[in-house]
Image (tube, rainbow, N blue to C red):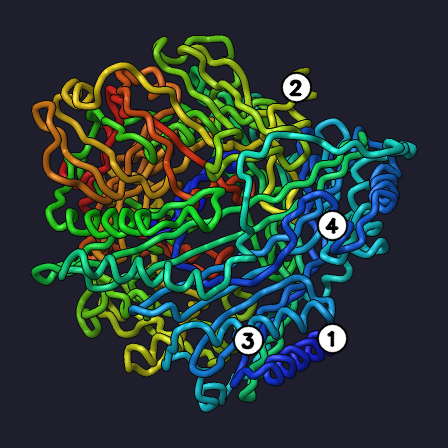
C-alpha cells in the first residue's frame, strides 16, 4: 500500500488487499566496520549463543505445546555513503541485533522478540510466543544438525574489510562521470549502500542454519536543465555482490544510463489514455510479473482463499510459450537466498509451466496446510517480524523471436523501459505499475519518449494476453529492489524478455 | 524509564565529545507494543515485544554522519561511537552541517498535547482480545454470505523518545497509540474476490470508535466493490475520499521540502507568493492539536514548533525547510518535519456534493501510481464508485487518473465537511473538476 515519490528505490508490496514495489532513495543511513568472515559459530563466538541456550529457549517457546518453534538470530550492519552537491559529505550506519522467537500451532503464530540476547530476555520473549498454544508442553529435539546448502553469494572480501578510503572515490567518481557527460546536468546525488546480515536459525525439529547475506548497490539520481525545463532520472546497480563488482566500467555504465535517461525526458510526450497494446522491455519490467502473478501465488493468500488465483492451479492461464519462475538460486541476484528465514534451502519454484499454473510459494505453515514440501519462500524483514511467504527473484523465460519483431507486432502502442514501482490487489487481481520512462510505438517502430505513466491491468487477464516473447531475456541487475507485504520489506529480483501484452489500461492525460 | 534515557543520552554525548566530536545530537527511543490478529474466530497471530534504539549524529571538523544501533551494551556503544567519530573525519567537508542556533530552541509551548493515554496501563490481555473479537464478529455479521475471509487486528503501543543535543537542547515525549483494523474479502463474479479494510487509529483508547463500527465499515466498503466494471475513458469530476487524500497529496507535499528545492527537484521552487491552487485550497500545518498524531512541541532538529499556513486560498506561502537546507538555501528555517496537515474543510457532505456534480467518480482507493516532484506529473490507479446525480451507479476498477500537480490543484472545486481523524493528514474529501479518467 506504499508508494514512493522518487524513483531510485523499486518497491513492491502486498497486503491482503494490496501490494507495492519500489527502488532505493538517497536516504540517511551510513557505514560501520566489522570483521570475521566465517559464518559457522558466529553467534556463539560473538554473543555466547550456545546450543544449550537455544534448546532451553525453544523449550520455553513450546511450554504450552504447539507444532514447532524456531529462533531467528540476526546481526545486521548497514552502511550508506551519500554524495550531494559534488562531495561525499554524509554517511550513515545502522546496526540491528536481536532474536525473534516463534511458536506455531496449525496456522496460528505466537511471536516475541528481544534485542537483549541474555538468556533471561530470550526466555521472556519465548514465553510471549508460547501464549498462542494452550496445551501441555513438549520438548525440542535433543541435538541440532547444521544445514548445508549451496552458496549463491560467496564473498572473498567482506564489506567490513574494505576501508572507507576505498569506497569514497567510487562514490565521487559517479558524480564526476555524470557531470562530464553533459553540460545539461545540474545536480547529481549518489548513494553507495552495503549491508552484511548474519543470521542463525535454530528450530525445535533440530535444524540449525547459519548464513551471511551481503547486499549492496550504487545508485545515481541526475537532474538535468535545458531551456528552462528540468527533468530527473535515476539508475542503480547492485545485488548480493561484493565491493570488487563496482568497477570503473560499471561506474561508466551507471553514469551514462542515469544521464541519458534524464536527457531523453526533455522530448517526452504523454501517451493517449485508455486500452492499448503494451510492449515490456527486457529486465526491470519483470516488476509486472511480480505484481500480476507473483503476489497472488503466495500460499498464505491462497490458503485463506483471498487470492484471485486460489482456484486456478492446474488450469491454463497463459499461452504455452509462457513459463514463469520464482528462484532463490540465481548467483548474486538481490532476491537470492541460500536458505529462507525458517531454514528451508534456497530453490527454484515454477509458477507457470508452459501456460499451466503449477503451484504456490510456500512457507512451512502453508506447506503443511497443502501437504507439500516448503518451497523456500518463508522470508522476513528482520528478527522483529515473523515469516510469511514471499517471492525471491521472479522472471519469465525467453521466447524465440528478436525484440524488433515483438515491437513490430504491437503496431501502435507503448514500450515500457523503466518502472519505478508497482502494486496489486490480491483478491481482484488488479495491478498497477508506474512507468517512469518508455517510448511510443507507431507503425511497429519505437517513436517519441514517454514518461510518468501509470499502467493498470488485471493479473489473470494480462497473463492470457501475453501474445509474444522475444529472445532477449535479462535479469534486472539492481540491488535496491524491495518488496513490501504485511508491513515488511524484503529484497526481491526481477527478470523478463521483451514481451507483448495485447492490451492494458494506460493512464495518460489525453482523453 | 525517563531517567534511563537521559542517562544514556548524557553518556552518548560524553563519549562523542571525548572521541573528538565538536557537537552531536542523540535520539533515543523505546517502545512496548502488543499486536493481536484474529481470523476464523481464533487468534491468528499474537506478537509482543519491547524495543530500544539510539541514533547519534556526529558533527566533527565540519563533517557529518548519522549512526544508529539497537546494541546498547556499554562496551559496544563506546566502540560504536568512537568508530563513528573517526570515520566521520574521512568524509568531505560540509560547512552547512551544524546544530541549529540555540535561539531556535526557545519559546517551546508548554501545553499538554494529549499524546499519552494515562489509562494505557489498565489495558488488559482480555480487553485486547475482546476488542479484536468484536471487530471480527461485526465484519462477519455485516458481510453475511458474501464473506470469503475476514481478518481483524488490534495494536497498541506505548513509546517514549528523548532528543538531546550537545548545544543545550533536550526534549522528552511519551505517546500511546491504539488501532483496530478489519479486512474482508468477498465473493464476486468469476475469480474476482474484492477486498477492503476498515481502520481507526487514535492516541487514546477512548478516542477510538466502537470496535463493531470498524468491522462493519470494512464489510460495507468491501460489499460496495462487488460487480466493479471498467468504463470508457472520459473527462469527469472526481471526489477523492478523505482517508486517501494524503496518498494523492503526497506528490504535492514532496515539492514543498527544502531538500527538493535545493536539489532542483521541486516544481514549486520558484512559486512562493504565486497562485498554485484554487481559492478553496488552504493548507495549514498545525502542531498543536490535542490528541492528534502529528502534534509535538519541537521538530527533529529541536526547533520550536509553530503553526504555519503553507497555502492560503491558493497562494503558496511557505516551505518545509529544515536547519540544514535552510543554510544551503540561505533561507530562514521553518521545519523539515510536517506535523498535522490540514486542508480547510467545507460545509457540505460528500453526498450533497455528489448531487451537484452530475456524473463523476468517487475515489475510495488508489493502486500503484507515483508523482514526479521535479515536474509535478502524476498518474495513479483508482478504485471507487461511478455516480450520477447523487446516486451510486456501480463500482469501477482497473482505471487510472493522470494530471499535473501544478494544474490539478487549480481545479480544486470544493472540500467536504469530513476531515479525516485517524491520520496526521487531517484532510476532508476533496473535489477536482475535469480529470481524465482512463479506462477502456
Task: Give the Cα separation between the discs numbered 4 and 3.
Answer: 27 Å
Task: Give the Cα separation between the discs numbered 4 and 2.
Answer: 29 Å
Residue on which the image places disc 3: B85
Mark 1: secondary structure: helix
Establish whether labels 1 and 3 are both on one chain.
yes
**For the residues bearing labels 4 and 2, Cβ distance under 8 angstroms:** no
Task: Give the Cα separation between the discs numbered 1 and 2.
Answer: 48 Å
Q: x%, y% of residue B58?
A: 52, 76
Q: Is residue A383 above or below residue B107?
A: above
Establish whether labels 4 and 1 are both on one chain.
no
The dot on residue A373 is 2
Q: x%, y% of residue A305?
A: 56, 22
Answer few, some or many: residues within 10 Å of disc 4's Cα (few below 14, many 20 plus, some between 14 and 19). some
Residue on which the image places disc 1: B4
Residue on which the image places disc 4: A43
Task: Give the Cα separation between the discs numbered 3 and 2.
Answer: 50 Å
Numbered disc 3: what chain? B
Task: Give the Cα separation between the discs numbered 1 and 3.
Answer: 24 Å
Establish whether labels 1 and 2 are both on one chain.
no
4 or 2: tag closer to the N-terminus: 4
The dot on residue B137 is none
- Say which quarter of the image contains residue A180: bottom left
Work out whether residue B308 or residue B55 is closer to the camera in this orientation and state it. Answer: B55
Numbered disc 1: what chain? B
Q: Quadrant of the C terminus of chain B?
A: top left
Numbered disc 2: what chain? A
Q: x%, y% of residue B374?
A: 24, 58
Q: Is residue B376 above or below residue B36?
A: below
Amino acid at each position: 500500500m506504499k508508494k514512493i515519490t522518487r524513483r531510485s528505490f523499486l518497491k513492491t508490496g502486498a497486503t491482503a488487499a494490496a501490494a507495492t514495489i519500489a527502488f532505493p532513495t538517497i536516504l540517511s543511513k551510513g557505514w560501520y566496520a566489522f570483521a570475521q568472515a566465517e559464518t559457522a559459530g558466529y553467534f556463539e563466538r560473538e554473543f555466547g549463543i550456545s546450543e544449550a541456550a537455544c534448546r532451553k529457549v525453544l523449550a520455553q517457546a513450546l511450554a504450552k505445546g504447539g507444532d514447532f518453534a524456531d529462533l531467528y538470530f540476526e546481526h545486521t550492519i548497514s552502511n550508506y555513503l551519500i554524495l550531494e552537491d559534488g562531495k561525499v559529505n554524509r554517511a550513515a550506519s545502522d546496526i540491528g541485533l536481536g532474536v525473534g522467537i516463534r511458536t506455531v500451532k496449525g496456522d496460528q503464530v505466537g511471536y516475541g522478540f528481544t534485542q537483549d540476547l541474555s538468556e533471561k530476555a530470550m526466555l521472556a520473549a519465548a514465553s510471549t510466543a508460547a501464549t498462542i498454544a494452550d496445551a501441555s508442553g513438549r520438548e525440542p529435539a535433543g541435538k541440532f544438525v547444521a544445514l548445508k546448502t549451496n552458496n549463491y553469494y560467496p564473498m572473498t572480501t567482506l564489506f567490513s574489510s574494505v576501508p572507507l578510503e576505498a569506497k569514497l572515490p567510487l562514490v565521487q567518481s559517479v558524480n564526476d562521470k555524470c557531470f562530464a557527460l553533459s553540460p545539461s546536468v545540474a545536480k547529481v546525488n549518489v548513494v553507495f549502500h552495503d549491508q552484511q546480515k548474519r543470521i542463525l536459525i535454530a528450530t525445535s525439529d533440530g535444524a540449525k542454519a547459519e548464513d551471511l547475506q551481503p547486499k549492496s548497490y550504487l545508485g545515481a539520481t541526475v537532474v538535468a536543465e535545458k531551456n528552462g525545463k528540468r527533468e530527473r532520472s535515476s539508475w542503480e546497480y547492485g545485488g548480493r555482490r561484493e565491493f570488487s563488482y563496482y568497477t570503473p566500467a560499471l561506474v561508466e555504465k551507471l553514469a551514462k544510463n542515469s544521464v541519458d535517461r534524464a536527457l531523453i525526458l526533455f522530448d517526452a510526450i504523454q501517451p493517449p489514455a485508455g486500452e492499448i497494446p503494451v510492449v515490456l522491455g527486457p529486465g526491470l519490467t519483470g516488476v509486472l510479473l511480480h505484481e500480476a502473478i507473483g503476489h497472488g501465488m503466495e500460499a498464505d493468500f491462497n490458503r485463506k482463499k483471498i487470492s484471485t488465483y486460489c482456484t486456478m492451479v492446474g488450469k491454463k492461464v497463459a499461452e504455452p510459450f509462457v513459463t514463469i519462475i520464482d528462484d532463490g538460486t540465481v548467483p548474486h541476484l538481490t532476491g537470492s537466498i541460500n536458505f529462507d528465514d525458517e531454514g528451508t534451502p534456497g530453490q527454484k519454484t515454477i509458477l507457470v509451466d508452459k501456460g499451466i499454473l503449477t503451484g504456490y510459494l510456500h512457507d512451512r505453515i502453508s506447506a503443511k496446510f497443502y501437504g507439500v514440501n516448503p518451497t523456500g519462500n518463508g522470508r522476513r524483514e528482520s528478527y522483529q517480524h515473523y515469516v510469511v511467504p514471499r517471492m525471491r527473484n521472479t522472471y519469465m523465460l525467453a521466447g524465440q523471436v528478436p525484440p524488433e519483431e515483438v515491437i513490430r507486432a504491437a503496431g501502435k502502442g507503448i514500450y515500457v523501459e523503466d518502472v519505478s514501482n508497482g502494486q496489486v490487489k490480491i483478491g481482484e487481481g488488479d495491478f498497477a505499475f508506474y512507468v517512469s520512462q518508455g517510448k511510443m510505438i507507431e507503425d511497429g517502430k519505437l517513436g517519441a519518449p514517454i514518461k510518468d505513466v501509470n499502467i493498470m491491468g488485471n493479473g489473470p487477464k494480462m497473463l492470457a494476453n501475453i501474445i509474444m516473447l522475444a529472445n532477449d531475456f535479462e535479469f534486472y541487475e539492481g540491488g535496491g529492489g524491495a518488496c513490501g507485504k504485511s508491513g515488511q520489506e524484503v529484497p526481491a529480483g526481477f527478470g523478463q524478455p521483451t514481451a507483448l501484452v495485447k492490451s492494458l489500461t494506460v493512464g495518460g492525460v489525453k482523453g | 524509564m525517563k531517567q534511563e534515557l537521559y542517562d544514556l543520552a548524557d553518556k552518548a554525548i560524553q563519549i562523542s565529545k571525548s572521541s573528538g566530536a565538536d557537537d552531536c545530537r542523540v535520539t533515543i527511543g523505546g517502545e512496548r507494543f502488543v499486536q493481536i490478529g484474529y481470523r476464523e474466530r481464533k487468534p491468528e497471530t499474537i506478537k509482543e515485544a519491547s524495543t530500544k534504539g539510539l541514533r547519534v549524529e556526529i558533527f566533527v571538523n565540519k563533517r557529518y554522519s548519522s549512526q544508529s544501533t539497537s546494541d546498547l551494551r556499554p562496551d559496544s556503544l563506546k566502540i560504536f561511537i568512537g568508530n563513528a567519530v573517526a570515520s566521520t573525519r574521512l568524509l568531505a567537508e560540509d560547512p552547512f552541517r551544524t546544530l541549529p542556533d540555540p535561539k531556535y530552541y526557545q519559546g517551546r509551548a508548554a501545553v499538554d498535547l494529549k499524546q499519552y493515554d494515562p489509562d494505557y496501563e489498565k489495558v488488559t490481555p482480555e480487553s485486547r482480545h475482546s476488542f479484536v473479537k468484536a471487530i471480527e464478529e461485526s465484519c462477519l455479521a455485516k458481510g453475511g454470505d458474501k464473506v470469503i475471509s475476514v481478518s481483524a487486528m488490534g495494536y497498541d503501543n506505548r513509546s517514549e523518545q528523548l532528543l538531546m543535543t550537545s548545544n543545550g537542547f533536550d526534549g522528552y515525549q511519551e505517546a500511546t497509540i491504539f488501532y483496530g483494523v478489519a479486512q474482508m474479502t468477498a465473493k464476486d463474479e468469476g475469480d474476482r474476490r474484492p477486498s477492503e479494510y476498515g481502520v481507526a487509529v487514535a492516541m487514546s483508547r477512548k478516542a477510538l470508535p466502537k470496535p463493531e463500527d470498524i468491522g462493519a465499515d470494512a464489510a460495507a466498503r468491501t460489499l460496495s466493490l462487488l460487480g466493479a466494471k471498467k468504463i470508457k475513458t472520459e473527462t469527469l469530476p472526481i471526489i477523492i475520499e478523505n482517508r486517501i487524500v494524503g496518498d494523492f497529496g503526497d506528490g504535492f507535499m514532496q515539492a514543498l521540502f527544502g531538500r527538493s528545492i535545493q536539489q532542483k527537484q521541486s516544481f514549486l521552487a520558484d512559486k512562493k507568493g504565486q497562485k498554485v491552487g484554487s481559492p478553496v485550497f488552504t493548507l495549514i500545518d498545525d502542531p498543536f492539536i490535542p490528541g492528534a498524531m502529528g502534534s509535538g512541541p519541537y521538530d527533529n532538529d529541536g526547533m520550536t514548533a509553530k503553526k504555519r499556513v503553507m497555502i492560503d486560498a491558493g497562494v503558496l506561502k511557505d516551505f518545509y525547510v529544515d536547519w540544514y537546507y535552510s543554510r544551503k538555501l540561505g533561507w530562514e528555517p521553518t521545519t523539515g518535519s510536517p506535523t498535522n496537515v490540514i486542508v480547510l474543510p467545507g460545509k457540505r457532505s460528500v453526498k450533497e456534493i455528489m448531487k451537484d456534480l452530475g456524473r463523476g467518480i468517487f475515489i475510495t482507493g488508489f493502486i500503484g501510481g507515483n508523482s514526479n516532484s521535479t515536474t509535478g506529473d502524476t498518474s495513479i490507479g483508482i478504485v471507487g464508485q461511478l455516480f450520477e446525480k447523487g446516486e451510486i451507479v456501480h463500482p469501477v476498477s482497473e482505471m487510472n487518473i493522470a494530471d499535473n500537480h501544478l494544474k490539478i490543484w487549480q481545479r480544486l472545486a470544493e472540500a467536504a465537511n469530513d476531515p479525516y481523524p485517524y491520520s496526521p493528514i487531517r484532510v476532508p474529501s476533496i473535489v477536482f473538476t475535469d480529470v481524465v479518467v482512463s479506462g477502456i
